[in-house]
Image (cartoon, rainbow, N blue to C red):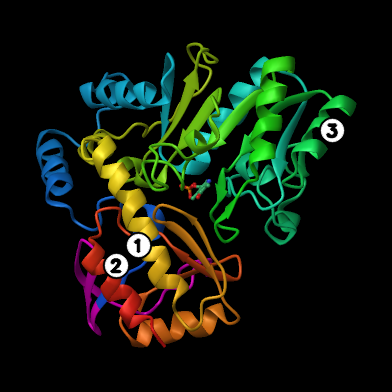
Amino acid sequence: MLAPVYSPCGLSVERAEGMRLYTDRGMFLDGYAGIGVLPLGHSHPDVVRAIAEKASRFTHLSNYFLDPDAVEMADTLVSKTGRPGEVYFSNSGAEANEAALKAVRKHRKGVVVSFEGNFHGRTMGALSITWGPSMRKPFEPLVPGCVFLPLNGSMLLDFAEAYDVAAVFLECIQGNSGVIPIPEELAEAAKTLQREKGVLVVADEIQAGLGRTGKFFCFEHHGLEPDIVTMGKGIGGGLPLGAAVFSGWSPFGAGDHGSTFAPNPVSLAAGNAVLSHLTPEFIEDVDRKGIFFREKLAALPWAKEVRGRGLMIGVSTEDAAGVKEKAFDRGVLLNAAGGGIRFLPSLAATEAELEEMAERLDF
Ligand SMILES: *Cc1c(COP(=O)(O)O)cnc(C)c1O
């Protein structure tokens, strides 16, 4: 009786803690943390406490009430961008990108540029800038005025000579395409268009943000100053939440956009508990653990190329489905993306836990 859009792995989970899932088939190490949704791993005590505390007071009030947790989180997210700004909260990543698209459309006429390999979500607007003809084709016509360019800076500059570009959507490390970092010259081209033509730069940090790549935001690796930053996945500490940060401008007025549920008070409390852990020291540690883990992964017999930064890691291999299956038999949950294996483990994983996972994957 369920729409067959997913392929569940068949495990029945009793409880989950950190990197470990306790199931009807024994303990599994989790290589993807709820698809990048749990920066501190499963059931982190501070997150569980924040959820219980908030839910015991109220679970939903509506946007007729201002939640102090919303103010606190907005303050944190804006300060992390390093520029003045404001936050629109949503319930998911795709909805954060919908908000970004609406903000772009309201303020700048012109083409919205996305890139081959980008993933921005599956709602009609987000899907219009999501690469993958097979994903889009059955649902056309989508939102008009969106194009895809190769990950190439000079092609972007040439395109912007020929057409008016309103915005450029960047996924600085393409997660769903297999952890593909964008070339530096593409980031430079986006900066040039932003500076010289006022083109809006949107950074989708839904997967790569929140310390995952060894910086709070992945765009920091390129010195970008995006006009819009979108977030989702880990921002709600495992509960549904998304956010769009508008830096240096204020695209929406009263009634321009909204959602019945967003932002959910319990999600905000859980997310603030996560954010309080993401100190510069914690994030430096993610970088260090990432180097350690990537070295271990590169030594595995089935690993070809190892890509990524921090604990966002893609490993190409000849037979991703086979590797996933063998890993499952050895008690490791892996996720295949872009024809390889994508690792998005808990950022709180210890070196010992990462090593234990790598040892189990030595086949
Ligand atoms: C997961 C993801 C999205 C979509 O988020 P949802 O919460 O599934 O709507 C968008 N962009 C990127 C980069 C993602 O990884």
Position of 30 compared to 110: left or right? left
Considering only order in the chain, which callout, 2 or 1, is on the residue closer to the N terminus? 1
Badge 3 amino acid:
Phe
Q: In the displayed structure, would residue 34 be above or below residue 210?
A: below
Q: Quick one: SS at disc 2?
A: helix
Alpha carbon distance from label 3 to label 1:
40 Å
Q: Residue 133, relative to residue 51: is it above or below?
A: below
Q: Which residue is mark 1?
A: 292
Q: Which mark is residue 145?
A: none
Which is more foreground, mark 1 or mark 2? 1
Q: Label 1 crowding class (10 Å Cα cut-off): few <14, some 14-19, many 20+?
A: some
Query: Within 10 Å of the Cα at label 2, are there few (<14), some (14-19), or many (20+) other Cα atoms?
Result: many
Question: Circle 3 — which element?
Answer: helix
- Is 355 or 330 nearer to us in this picture? 355
- Seen in the picture, residue 347 relative to 354 is either above or below; the reply is above
Which element type, helix, strand or loop, lies under badge 1? helix
Disc on res. 354: 2
Provide residue 333's location: percent of width, then percent of height. Answer: 36, 74
Residue pointed to by mark 3: 159
Front one among 261 and 209: 209
Percent x, y of residue 209: 43, 41
Q: Residue visible at 24% across and 34% down?
A: 272
Asked if the residue under mark 2 is in contact with the one under mark 1, i.e. CB atoms within 8 Å, the reply is yes
Q: Earlier in the sequence, mark 3 or mark 1?
A: 3
Tell me the CA gap for discs 1 and 2: 9 Å
Q: What quarter of the picture does the C terminus occupy?
A: bottom left
CB contact under 8 Å: marks 2 and 3: no
